[in-house]
Image (cartoon, rainbow, N blue to C red):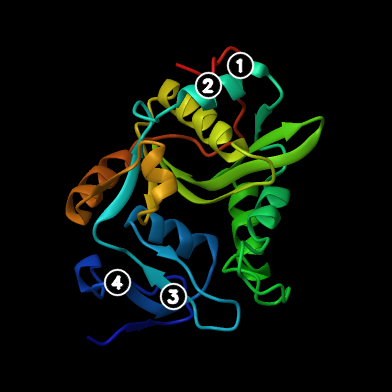
Amino acid sequence: MSITWLAASPESIFPPVEKATEHGLLAAGGDLSATRLLKAYERGIFPWFNKNDPILWWCPDPRMVLFTDKVHISKSLNKVIRKGHLTVTIDHAFEQVMKACSEPRHNQPTDPDNRTWIHSNMIDAYTDLHHQGYAHSIECWQNDKLVGGLYGVSIGKAFFGESMFSFVPDSSKVALIALCQQLQRWGMPMIDCQIYSDHLSRMGAEEMPRSEFIQQLEKLCAEKVTPRSWQLDTDLPYSL
């Protein structure tokens, strides 16, 4: 199957998601402008590529999603939360979170130009979305030090998770739980987790057929919500 190459203009159109390969690759090229990125996310499409490669656009089938009212909190994790050693904020350190997410995982090269797919071009693009009120970070702190968190994109009442990190055990899980509880209060029922992982599955995420995901996404993205900086409700319990 041939891959559609997008023109550099952000106005160039993505092909139907059904044209994606069996692995989810839909298109290549284009740019990382805010206009392009928002159009992509509204259609269930996201960029994922190495720094020196062409921009690649993906829409896998099935899709991994986490319903915000179904996040799983284990007894051991609940104990971690109740100890109160970790605190959570939203939109306090977006670029710092992205850079932390870009740190190499185990068995990855340490070359700063090829650490992960979260390279300088991606950080610049998503920081621009953050300044426009579309991209958000959830931070987990210990003794005023950033130790975990995640970031993603929000359109309407849909949230698209991009990446998370933990420098201390369970810190990204605590951030995810706080995010789920806050989104649930705002009437935002679903987080796009993109592709399957054991970690997310243990947190309650599940796979959904792409066609069903796109149908739900159309409804959620059509909700009229003004892009803005987010703030965490101070009375959230972070445990169930």
Q: In the picture shown, does residue 84 fall above or below 61?
A: above
Q: Which residue is mark 1?
A: 82
* Chain-order first, disc 4 or disc 3: 4
Identified at 47% across, 48% down, the residue is 161
Comes first in the chain, label 3 or label 1? 3
Secondary structure of residue under mark 1:
helix
Residue 23's label in the rendered image is 4
Q: Amino acid at mark 2?
A: Asn
Q: Which residue is mark 2?
A: 78
Q: Give the residue at x 69% y 46%.
A: 167
Q: What residue do we see at 71% from left, 41% from top?
A: 147
Check the picture and name the quadrant holding the N terminus: bottom left
Q: CA distance from mark 2 to mark 3?
A: 39 Å
Q: Amino acid at mark 3?
A: Leu
On the picture, is 70 further left or further right than 123?
left
* Amino acid at the residue labelled 1: Arg
- Tell which residue pokes out farthest to the bottom in this image: 2
- Closest to the camera, between mark 3 and mark 1, is 1
Residue 50 position in % (x across, y down): 55, 76
Compute the Cα span from label 2 to label 4: 36 Å
Write down the residue under mark 3.
56
Which of the 4 image quadrants contains residue 89?
A: top right
Q: Which mark is residue 111?
A: none
Point out the frontmost of discs 2 and 4: 2
* Rendered-image quadrant of the C terminus: top left
Contact between marks 4 and 1 (CB within 8 A): the answer is no
Q: Which SS class for mark 2?
A: helix
Q: CB atoms at circles 1 and 2 under 8 Å apart?
A: yes
Q: Amino acid at mark 4?
A: His
For marks 4 and 3, give the CA distance. 12 Å
Q: Is residue 154 above or below residue 211?
A: above
